[in-house]
Image: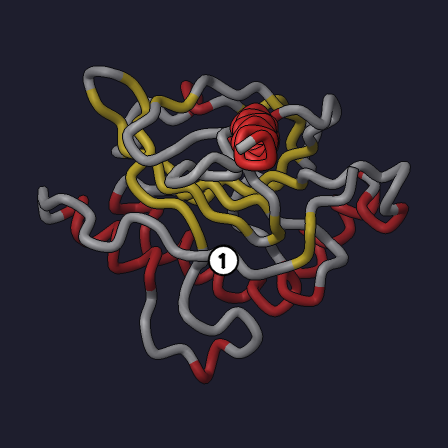
Amino acid sequence: MKKKNILFVLSLVLMTSLAIAGFSSGESTNNAGLTIGDTAAEINLLNVDGNMVSYDDYPDAEGFIVIFTCNTCPYAVASEDRIIALDAEFKDQGYPVIAINPNNPAVQPDDTFELMQAKAEEKGFTFPYLYDKTNTVYAQYGATKTPHVYLLENTDDGRVVRYIGAIDDNVRSASAVKERFLANAVYELLDGEEVTLKETKAIGCSVKQ
């Protein structure tokens, strides 16, 4: 009997410890950052052209395609042409791309602001490529990978998150893509519909901090 009581107490202690650590049954292990339906706060970040950029600089935007990306990750590099194409496809329809580099250059030296400028010029980026000098914006969103996408819709209640995850179903090869997760979500919003697939798994390099 005493043995059963001891096992019961130990089980309670274990369950309590796991709950405190965020591993309780049925709950997400990642409670940080934005989720579907949340409202994204304003940003004010340095662009590679030397100007500060915020969402309010786009008064006619219907929303934003926010992509956390960087200079160095092979997955991010493989996505660059796709990101440029997304901006060309959706900017004039009210959904411009906003790219943000979440990496700390002290940890990843090839992601300095100067090298971001060189990358933007080399690739002919048509969208802002922003430097998160405080290394905090990625954490507010909950971005963990490069690339990591957040689709925002402008509403009366603010910029509401409608999709989080990957650009498409093959981050390694654009030619092998079968399903354009992000583009499909934008088109649904443009048609006044609810986004069908709201979340996918972002696949890429971990954010370097």
* Relative image position of residue 73 (x, y in whole percent): 72, 60
- Residue sitting nearer the eye, 16 or 82: 16
Examine the rendered structure and indicate whether residue 87 appears above or below residue 9: below
Name the residue beneath numbered marker 1.
83
Q: How is the image coloured?
A: secondary structure
- 102 relative to 107 in the view: left or right: left
Task: Work out which residue is located at the far left of the displayed protein and give it.
Answer: 192
- 74 relative to 96 in the view: left or right: right
* Relative image position of residue 1 (x, y in whole percent): 53, 33
Is residue 168 visible in the rendered image? The answer is yes
- 100 relative to 110 in the view: left or right: left
- Residue sitting nearer the eye, 164 or 27: 27
Q: Residue at x 53, y 36 (%)?
A: 4
Q: Residue at x 46, y 83 (%)?
A: 175
* Residue 130 in which image quadrant: top right
* Residue 192 in which image quadrant: top left
Q: Secondary structure at mark 1?
A: helix
Q: How many marks?
A: 1
Q: Residue at x 78, y 37 (%)?
A: 209
* Relative image position of residue 97 (x, y in whole percent): 45, 44
Label 1 packing within 10 angstroms: few (<14), some (14-19), many (20+): many
Task: Work out which residue is located at the far bottom of the displayed protein and give it.
Answer: 176
Q: Residue at x 37, y 40 (%)?
A: 26
**What is the three-letter code of the residue carrying label 1?**
Ile
* Relative image position of residue 188 (x, y in whole percent): 17, 51
- Residue sitting nearer the eye, 62 or 36: 36
